[in-house]
Image: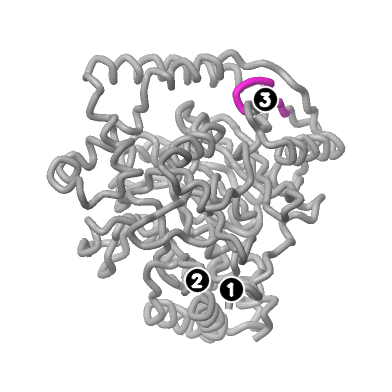
Amino acid sequence: MSDDLSFADAHSLAGMVRDGDLSPVDLCKHFLQRIERYNPKLQAFLRVTADQALAAARSAETALAAGLDTGTLLGMPVAIKDLIDYAGLPTTGGSTLRRDFVPTESATVAKKMMGAGTCMLGKTGLVEFAFGGVGINHHYGTPWNPWDADTQRIPGGSSSGSAVAVAAGLAPAALGSDTGGSVRIPASFCGLVGLKTTFGRISNKGIMPLDSSLDSVGPMTRSVRDAALIYQALAGPDPDDPNTWEQPVDEDIFAELHRGVKGLRLSIPREYFWDGVEPEVAAGVRAAADQLASLGANVEEGSLTELDDLIALRARGSIVAVEAYANLKEELENQLDQFDPIVSARMLDGAKFSAVDYFEIKRDLGALRLRMDRTMSSYDALIAPTTPLAAAPVEKVDQENAYFEVNGICLRNTMAGNLLGLCALSVPCGFTSAGLPIGLQLIGRAHTEGRLLRIGQAYEESTEWSKRTPDMAGFD
């Protein structure tokens, strides 16, 4: 089978399957062979589920032969982050503490993906308990960013394995989760599209929690169209997740996807997102803004005082640390020596908060969200770098003095969207002189995923960045 299929987007592959030009079984075998070939060095997958994937592929082939409703994802190989439950398989959360936890029921998103006819290739690596933006895991190994075969660079976290799997052509698409940037950061570092959905837009039932008030599932794909495809399959209410009950239902995402950006209002905030941004990253993002303007969008610079207030609020402490500590209190108190210290050190900060401190921060954050929502009503999206830097060498980051600083830098630009209750999209917008991807972040009001995907699609169609692929010769 042609190696060109390895980096084809899921939408194109699905069309070939539906048209009878490509066997879902052959497609599944192709990606399983690539996983066998490259995963020993890449360490994207913690567990490969070849039997389940091939069984699903055979079912898809039977459905096609019978002329049954093929659906848009039928026969499509995918990967899922290993904090998403899949019945009968361990859900480790990237921690040895959970290596023996085997759920009896699949997460809602896993059920929806299976119901859409996908073939689950396996479960991907992540930062322990999804708490980190760098992507390092000392228990199971750090997935290797495929854009540099000679020097191991950070893949971004916490959905590191999902990003590496898609970027390296081991899977057409994957699911990640985003609490402070865990879909967008690895998407940026690995040259992918990553969608951070509005909290509650997709069910969290059956997903190991980090921060139960911020966690959101999102797709990681090679194209904006693929992100829209998976988002549409997953979004919607779930009676088992009360946070989804009253979420508004989007119109058909694909009806809006190709409408272009003419007349849309885009703002580049002057503050917050640009502190300490590497010059090549800044240049790439500003060139992307110019490109959107050339397509007819109204792009302007402005100031958002809400972002200054967010800085002051974050300085008072991390609510993510509080909720992470609450979710893992028993393990932190009784099995601390089994945690990766770079994870537990930040979680233990959550134990220092009083109930009053936590309540006051949540109250003030709620008020800030209302202000931000009113301000955002004047714009269709904000433009910012997804990350202030390109992927740094693991060796330089994986040191006590460097890790916490770089981790904070990775999370700064993405965390704003989670804390302020927004949705966001990262798309590739260039490469550094060292050949490392640069990510453009589009940030919108809650429940405007369709609008962000529309902007991302217009930008992607007008550039060549998403068509570039890493050279895999050095990974054999």
Question: Looking at numbered disc 1 in the image, what kind of residue is underneath it?
Answer: Phe
The residue positioned 60% from the left and 32% from the top of the image is 444
C-alpha span from label 1 to label 2: 7 Å
C-alpha span from label 3 to label 1: 44 Å
Magenta residue check for 12? no
Q: Nearer the viewer, mark 3 or mark 1?
A: 1
- Dividing the picture into quadrants, the one containing residue 281 is top right
**Image quarter of the C terminus:** bottom right
Scheme of colours in the image: one colour
- Residue 104 visible in the picture: no
Place of residue 249 in the rendered image (x, y in percent of width and height, measured from the top left): 50, 41
Place of residue 37 in the rendered image (x, y in percent of width and height, measured from the top left): 53, 80
The residue positioned 44% from the left and 49% from the top of the image is 158
Q: According to the image, label 2 marks what residue?
A: 41
Place of residue 30 in the rendered image (x, y in percent of width and height, measured from the top left): 56, 82
Please indicate whether residue 122 sits to the left or right of residue 42 in the image.
Answer: left
* First to last magenta residue range: 266-273
C-alpha span from label 3 to label 2: 44 Å
Q: Residue furthest right?
A: 294
Q: According to the image, label 3 marks what residue?
A: 379
Which sits earlier in the primary sequence, circle 1 or circle 2?
Answer: 2
Please indicate whether residue 263 sits to the left or right of residue 386 in the image.
Answer: right
Which sits earlier in the primary sequence, circle 3 or circle 1?
Answer: 3
Look at the picture and state if 302 lies above or below 17: above
Q: Are marks 1 and 2 in contact (CB under 8 Å)?
A: yes
Q: According to the image, label 1 marks what residue?
A: 475
The residue positioned 47% from the left and 33% from the top of the image is 418
